[in-house]
Amino acid sequence: MAAITPLRWEPSAEITSTALVEKPIDADDEDLPLNERIDLGVEALLEAHLKNNAGEIDAAFADLFKLGVRRDRAEERILMQWAKSHGLDISTTAAPNQQVRGRVIGKAKEGKGMRQQLPGFGLDNDLHLLVSDAAAGKTTAFCELATVMTARDKGFLDHEAPRIDPPDDPRSTALVIASDGEGTAYSMWENYLASINGQERGALLEVWAQDDEKGENPWNVSLHNLQRLYKRMAMGDVAVVIIDTANAVFRGAGINVGTGPIETYLRLLKQIVCRTAPLWISQHTNRNGGTTMKAIGGHPAFQEVPSVVHLIEAKQQADGSKIRIWHVLKLRGSNYRRFSYVLEAGELKVTDGHFFENCREQVLVLIHKQILVAGFTSPSDLIRLSNRPPQSVYNALDELRGMKLIRSRGRGFRLTSAGERFVESLKISPDQPDWIA
């Protein structure tokens, strides 16, 4: 593991105001107009955040509240002021951490790397959101993304995607902000990366995660941490930034994911990262929106601000197997599509699949697959291949015949035209896009 030289953060001259230098800030000075007292209070709050002094932060919030400024509005004010001081354009509480770089998985490459674009899937220098339920495969997908963006060994899921890498692109490191999982996050990412042979393929990940030995806390969107991210991005070698998860980095800073100034924070993160690299943030679903944009949990800004939104759906098949379906819900300049994929021999691969919810659909898909390979479709063959009880298969065949989806042929069955159409409706294929009404 490469040695890391700690860097000390010093307040820049850009954010040191004359008021801070020449006289102490006193928002309670009643001789000043209200707007000036509020400005002084905001400066005090910003300075407290940059020092990461919990006591001063609470006191500054309390002073602003006495002046009629709500906490969420005060947060927006300091974000905008900090962004302006760093030349960023956004419209709309742990111990200080002086370590800029994080722990590294994989060996650093020599020379300039090539960063792979993801046609039809991801945009360079833009904000992406990846939505999923727990255990849907989000971390594995992120590991694959980090691998292909740094090792450049193949495309992401679509391994035949054309390469449009500039040959002089120096970006070769994936910065992973693994705030979810707390003390286990780093080892979890190591394990998931091993499951896709990421290190062997040449992945280079820098992971910011809780480190009890060094006293490093999980990264969150507090201003002193945003300052750390700003300085890290200025090094110019980051190919992609992955934040896992939105809940962890917002709640870690005391921000309500449903009602806080989420839009302002997302725009600020986009300004910090996406001037030089794409940003991917994971978010949970609300479990009531199906597979549309309404499935995104939390603040409406999660639907509106990102230019790209992906959703991973893990569904249980009628035969007990699990199918993972990737939905591209939003992609600037493209249309909605979906495909199924599997983890096979240490690689994520797009597959042609069908989703069936009951024995009847399972048997119909099985007949279709057997016909494609010139296999047998007798009841005994279908019972053996489906691993279903004989009576369940016979009942399914009776239902399919009654629906005029199959017809008898010799000892087996064939699909009718209606049956072929029904099988096609169950198909999940990258070559067959779906459309949102």
Image: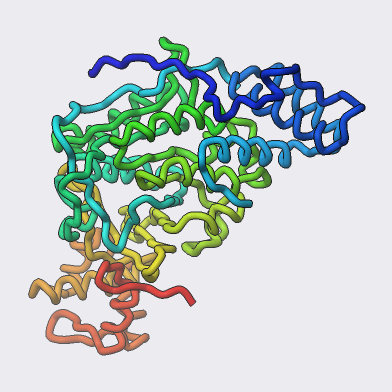
**Percent x, y of residue 340:** 29, 60
Residue 235 is left or right of residue 25, and the answer is left
Determine the image quadrant of residue 207.
Answer: top left
Quarter of the view holding residue 413: bottom left
**Residue 356, how many percent across, how many down?**
35, 66
Using the image, determine if residue 52 lies above or below residue 15. Answer: above
Residue 52 appears in the rendering: yes
Observer-nearest residue: 102 or 272?
272
Q: How is the image coloured?
A: rainbow
Q: Count how many numbered circles sit on residues in the image.
A: 0
In the image, residue 414 sits, relative to residue 6, either above or below, namely below
Residue 108, placed above or below residue 359 = above
User: 24 or 370: nearer the eye?
Assistant: 24
Of all residues shown, which one is farthest toward the left? Answer: 374
Q: Residue 217's x, y, as percent? A: 49, 20
Kindly identify the residue that appears in the image at 31 percent across and 53 percent down: 321
Where on the picture, by quarter, is residue 338? Answer: bottom left
Residue at image location 30% in from the left, 71% down from the top: 427
* Residue 365 drawn above or below residue 314: below
Residue 320 in sight from this viewpoint: no
Nearest the eye: 313 or 209: 209
Looking at this view, is 265 or 382 the one in front?
A: 265
Q: Residue at x 9, y 71 (%)?
A: 373
Q: Residue at x 60, y 30 (%)?
A: 253
| Horizontal side, residue 16 vs residue 65: left or right | left
Q: Is residue 344 left or right of residue 178?
A: left
